[in-house]
Amino acid sequence: MNPGAWAAEHRRLGYSAAYVPSIDSDMSLIQEYVRAAQAADLLWAEVGAWSNPLSTDASERRKALDLCCQRLELAEKMGACCCVNIAGSRGPKWDGPNPANLTEETFDLLVQVVRQIIDAVKPTRTFYTLETMPWIFPDSPDSYLRLIQAVDRQAFAVHLDPVNMINCPARAYDTAGFLRECFAKLGPYIRSCHAKDIQFTQHLTLHLDECRPGTGLLDYPTYLRELAQLSADVPLMLEHLPNPQEYELAAQYVRRCARQVEVVLR
């Protein structure tokens, strides 16, 4: 699909923000997408840098760092809200759990990695962010605040995926309270958000499963009210759904909740 048709399809579906496609080195194509997005009044939400810069394998770690820098550079060129990755993992699976993930040694390493990426690119129009996760830093609003303070770079900000931090019954049973905590503590730093949902099953010992917005426990009216209070234009992006029909159902639910709480979606 060419950039013009791509932008038109986003607008036909009622979206006002878009993920940046994988177009790292083609400046001509980048400019075409930028012009198409501007013409359609589309906000560039985020550039994904999905990789493992905390890998214990030196070669994989170097490749991940290079990719993060390249993708942050792309976000800067396109004026995207942010470049987003997860912290990475110290285990064999790039985004998987590992006992070392939540140690102080890993926290210190993560601080060094984020500084290295930001200092290499020196962005002024965008931000490097880490998507919140259930078993990797940052896994709570407080751990994200601690990370922001430790990294100490203006170009480091927050990517909020509240579902990824709902990793216990206390949070699952009070998603409204948890969402309010997230926005109270992280609101000034949030640059992009993900929209999904979570189900709490009755299988022992504990099972939490991601699902389509509207089919789980996440309090979307609270999510949208809190998001609407931010001063910045922060996109809310659907993800991880298996087909266009599921995306349409998810979008319908989010828009219905917005009308319910009188939040205007751009």
Image (tube, rainbow, N blue to C red):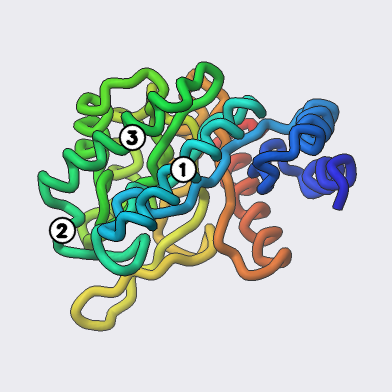
Instruction: Please tell me whether residue 215 is drawn above or below residue 122 in the rendered image.
Output: below
Q: What residue type is labelled 3?
A: Val
- Whether tag 3 and tag 2 are in contact, CB under 8 A, the answer is no
> Which secondary structure, mark 1?
helix
Q: Which amino acid does label 2 sit on?
A: Ala
Instruction: Please tell me whether residue 144 is drawn above or below residue 208 in the rendered image.
Output: above
Residue 110: give x, y in percent of width and height.
Answer: 25, 41
How far is the residue under mark 3 from the one under mark 2? 18 Å
- Observer-nearest residue: 81 or 241? 81
Q: Which mark is residue 114?
A: 3
Residue tagged 2: 100
Residue 62: give x, y in percent of width and height.
Answer: 38, 48
Residue name at image x 66 percent, y 48 percent: 22
Residue 112: give x, y in percent of width and height.
Answer: 25, 34
**Residue 221 visible in this rendered orientation of the protein:** no
How far is the residue under mark 1 from the one under mark 3? 12 Å
**How many numbered discs, if any?**
3
- Say which label, 2 or 1, has the lower sequence index: 1
> Which secondary structure, mark 3?
helix
Outermost residue on the left side: it is 104
How far is the residue under mark 2 from the one under mark 1? 23 Å
Q: Residue 66 carries which label?
A: 1
